[in-house]
Image: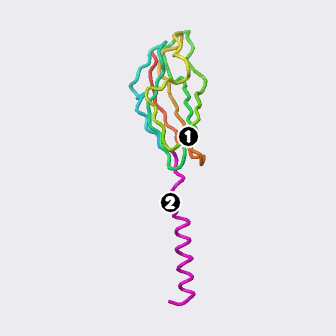
Amino acid sequence: MTRINYLLLVLLVAFVSACGGDDKDRAPELDITFPTGTTKFMRSGDFTFSATITDDVELKEIKFALAFKSGLKGIEDPWVPADDVRTLTGKEKVYTNEILFNDPIIYECKAGIYTLLVTVTDKAGNITEKSVDVTID
């Protein structure tokens, strides 16, 4: 092999290694186990959440937001708590029956379907979002 061919081969291997890399920098993985689309929460009860979150490098933050989707007609207002934002560290976080939004569901809220939006961000800025519809009765 000539010197030029050898040099080109070395450069090609270096380029492929740099571009192919170790495939770190993927978006976090979010596996929500509770609530599911059939979950009913009772007014005055806690809004709980269970999930496993993993990342290939390091987690940074999780945000929970709740929005009213549809419901029964009436004079009550929907329950729209402030977003619940939490700092994460490490590569994995497991939530088991975690109470969200710091307070129980207000009793006077409108019954109906609500959408829980969960947004997870890692240290690289990658974002994963998942939503689940639930019923508040």
Q: Please say if 124 is above or below 110.
A: below
Q: Secondary structure at mark 2?
A: loop
Residue 63 in magenta?
no
Mark 1, other Cα within 10 Å: few <14 / some 14–19 / many ≥20: few
Q: Residue at x 59, y 35 (%)?
A: 87
In percent of width and height, residue 19 lies at 55, 65
3D distance between C-alphas at marks 2 and 1: 21 Å
Identity of the amino acid at label 1? Thr
Categorize mark 2 by other alpha carbons within 10 Å: few (<14), some (14-19), many (20+).
Answer: few
Query: x, y (%) of residue 106?
Result: 53, 13
Residue 135, position as x, y percentages in the image: 44, 21
Picture disc at residue 22: 2
The majority secondary structure of the magenta stretch comes to helix
Would residue 37 appear left or right of 116 to someone viewing this image? left
Q: Assign a secondary structure to mark 1.
A: loop
Q: Which residues are magenta?
A: 1-28
The number of numbered badges drawn on the structure is 2
Furthest-front residue in view?
A: 90
* Front residue of 73 and 108: 108
Residue, far left: 38
Looking at the image, residue 9 lies above or below residue 110: below
Q: Which residue is mark 1?
A: 89
Examine the image and state in which quarter residue 76 appears: top right
